[in-house]
């Protein structure tokens, strides 16, 4: 569905994708609240509106609007300061944007979920945004007289998301004896017993690693028996940012005096510039944005050209006996790729893993993989369309018989396959110089496929360690500084899926001729560090088994602030 925010000249809606992070969750011992997946999903389920100014608000306990005092920071625009409009200790934020949803869809708006203010509580509302030509407000209520409450500039004060207008009335709720669903009862009782046993085990033998202190059935989308009953379980949301518009500029401030409340009768009063003035301002903003983008591209191109002056600085090196500190200093912190050899010598996987071994170890456990990939040129962009299930031993027979890019078990299938492939964990060694691992939970995401499997040109939202266990892979890379030339048309993908197959279409993509590509053939037993933002495509040259790790010993959360709009 499409969600539009109409913006008047001079309006500045500070709207962003809601963050899963909360300060109180970060500060908790071992950040344990993040173990609760429903909390994180609720936190990020929609968009946040940010305060345009900092201010302090207090209430003397009286019923009138003037009993609320709002003192804004000195640099605040008076037109953006919240107002006390309705009394009873409430105050009101105006939202400088007119939201419009498709027919039958409302907007649910409240305060940021699982976020707290001492002495103030957000009020919630449901607004019919498919027809109303009115803006709406966000209201808060002070809960304690004579108590000062502080809001910072750019602090989220509202959270919203679309809901179906008639959905709730179509719900038919009823209480049901659990005996009517014997399978549900059996699963619940199995989980209850396993949870009690798990908690006793943790109490008697406290794990060293925080991740081992909690069960992960729900987090991983697994039934107590170990299988995943659905294909769209969410561990995190990929909500898109609002795309920018040329009308969001600083040249024509407008005053919004009313909103969609009964007292105002939904009338909006604004200083409306002339059509000619508006067009002139839009052209000026467009020119300014182009200049700014050109400057960013100039800086990135200059950095890449300067790095290219030295083969030592620009080449992708192969190293052995790399220490943890040298990896951090020379590669991880500078965001420079490197191929690391010799780290898998003691891994049982290096000598054991083969198609026959996989079949004997995992057997006929049901797994999910990416199937029928050759039916669509966009198999990477629409991965959900290619989710396929099959017993693991039959999958191995399939890929050994067919080859090519049609069937591939990838990292995207990892949450569904975790329990089925768990028998292979014991074969995976530790790389604890670089990664945060434990013997019982090595982490990592498996990729299993025949020669010819292909991953389109893209960049990732985390730093990755690509560990090649079996077979060889050809990796084509381009530095993050080459991004303006990579024809990034949607999310993390390039419009050019395979830079080696572009042939006579180079005229279509002239900027690619200036990109410095690096070709690396990753051999069995080698690991490759690919920094966040580096473009890469990958092709298997043999039957191939790869593990990608993101659980580095150092921060690796660049995805949190990634602008999701295409």
Image: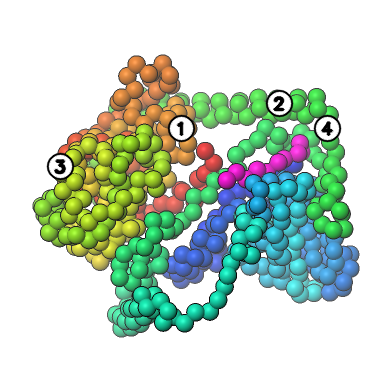
Q: Name the one closer to the observer, 177 or 390.
A: 177
Q: On the image, numbered disc 2 is attached to which residue? A: 284
Please tell me which residue is depicted at 71% across the width and 61% down the height of the picture: 125
Question: In the displayed structure, would residue 245 be above or below residue 2?
Answer: above
CB under 8 Å between callouts 3 and 4? Answer: no
Q: On the image, numbered disc 4 is attached to which residue? A: 273
Classify residue 335 by image quadrant. top left
Quarter holding the N terminus? top right
Q: CA distance from mark 2 to mark 4?
A: 15 Å
Q: CA distance from mark 3 to mark 4?
A: 69 Å
Task: Choose the circle earlier in sequence order: 3 or 4.
Answer: 4
Q: CA distance from mark 3 to mark 2?
A: 61 Å
Query: Which numbered disc, 1 or 2, marks the residue closer to the eye?
Result: 1
Q: Is residue 537 left or right of residue 44?
A: left
Element assignment for label 2? helix
Badge 1 density bin: few <14, some 14–19, many ≥20, Cα 10 Å: some
Q: Is residue 462 left or right of residue 79?
A: left
Task: Choose the circle earlier in sequence order: 4 or 1.
Answer: 4
Residue 2 lies within the magenta run:
yes
Q: On the image, numbered disc 3 is attached to which residue? A: 401
Badge 3 density bin: few <14, some 14–19, many ≥20, Cα 10 Å: few
Q: Position of residue 177 (x, y in %)?
A: 47, 82
Any mark on residue 82, and which? none
Task: Choose the circle earlier in sequence order: 1 or 3.
Answer: 3
Query: Which numbered disc, 2 or 4, marks the residue closer to the eye?
Result: 4
Q: Name the one closer to the observer, 526 or 192.
A: 192
Q: On the image, numbered disc 1 is attached to which residue? A: 488
Question: In the displayed structure, would residue 147 be above or below residue 519?
Answer: below
Q: CA distance from mark 4 to mark 1?
A: 36 Å
């Amino acid at each position: 569905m499409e969600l539009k925010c109409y913006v008047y000249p001079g309006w500045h809606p500070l709207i962003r994708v809601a963050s899963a992070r909360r300060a109180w969750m970060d500060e908790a011992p071992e950040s344990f609240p993040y173990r609760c997946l429903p909390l994180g999903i609720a936190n990020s389920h929609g968009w946040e509106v940010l305060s345009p100014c900092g201010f302090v608000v207090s209430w003397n306990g009286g019923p009138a609007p003037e009993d609320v005092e709002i003192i804004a920071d000195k640099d605040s625009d008076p037109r953006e300061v919240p107002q006390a409009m309705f009394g009873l200790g409430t105050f009101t934020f105006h939202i400088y944007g007119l939201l419009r949803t498709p027919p039958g869809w409302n907007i649910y708006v409240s305060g940021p979920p699982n976020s707290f203010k001492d002495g103030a509580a957000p009020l919630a509302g449901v607004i019919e945004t498919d027809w109303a030509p009115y803006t709406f407000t966000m209201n808060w209520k002070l809960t304690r007289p004579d108590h000062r409450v502080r809001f910072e500039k750019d602090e989220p004060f509202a959270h919203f998301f679309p809901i179906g207008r008639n959905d709730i009335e179509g719900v038919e709720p009823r209480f049901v004896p659990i005996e009517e669903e014997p399978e549900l009862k059996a699963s619940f009782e199995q989980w209850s017993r396993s949870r009690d046993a798990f908690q006793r085990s943790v109490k008697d033998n406290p794990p060293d690693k925080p991740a081992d202190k909690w069960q992960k059935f729900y987090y991983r989308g697994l039934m107590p028996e170990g299988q995943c009953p659905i294909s769209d379980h969410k561990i995190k949301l990929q909500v898109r940012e609002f795309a920018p518009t040329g009308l969001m500029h600083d040249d024509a401030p407008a005053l919004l005096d009313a909103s969609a409340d009964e007292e105002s009768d939904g009338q909006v009063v604004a200083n409306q510039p002339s059509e000619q003035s508006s067009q002139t301002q839009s052209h000026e903003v467009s020119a300014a944005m182009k200049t700014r983008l050109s400057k960013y591209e100039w800086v990135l191109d200059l950095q890449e050209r300067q790095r290219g002056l030295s083969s030592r600085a620009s080449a992708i090196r192969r190293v052995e006996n790399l220490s943890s500190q040298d990896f951090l200093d020379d590669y991880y912190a500078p965001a420079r790729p490197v191929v690391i050899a010799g780290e898998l010598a003691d891994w049982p996987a290096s000598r054991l893993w083969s198609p026959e071994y996989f079949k004997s170890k995992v057997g006929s456990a049901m797994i999910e993989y990416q199937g029928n990939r050759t039916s669509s040129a966009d198999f990477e962009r629409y991965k959900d369309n290619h989710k396929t299930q099959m017993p693991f031993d039959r999958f191995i027979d399939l890929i050994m018989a067919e080859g090519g890019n049609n069937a591939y078990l990838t990292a995207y299938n990892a949450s569904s396959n975790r329990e089925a492939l768990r028998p292979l964990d014991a074969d995976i060694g530790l790389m604890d110089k670089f990664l945060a691992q434990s013997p019982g939970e090595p982490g990592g995401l498996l990729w299993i496929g025949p020669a010819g499997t292909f991953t389109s040109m893209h960049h990732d939202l985390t730093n990755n360690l690509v560990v090649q266990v079996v077979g060889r892979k050809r990796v084509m890379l381009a530095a993050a500084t080459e991004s303006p030339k990579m024809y990034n048309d949607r999310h993390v993908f390039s419009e050019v899926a395979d830079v080696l197959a572009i042939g006579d279409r180079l005229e279509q993509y002239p900027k690619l001729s200036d990109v410095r590509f690096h070709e690396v053939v990753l051999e069995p037993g080698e690991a490759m560090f690919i920094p966040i933002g580096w473009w890469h495509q990958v092709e298997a040259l043999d039957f191939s088994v790869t593990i990608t790790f993101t659980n580095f010993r150092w921060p690796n959360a660049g995805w949190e602030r990634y602008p999701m709009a295409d």
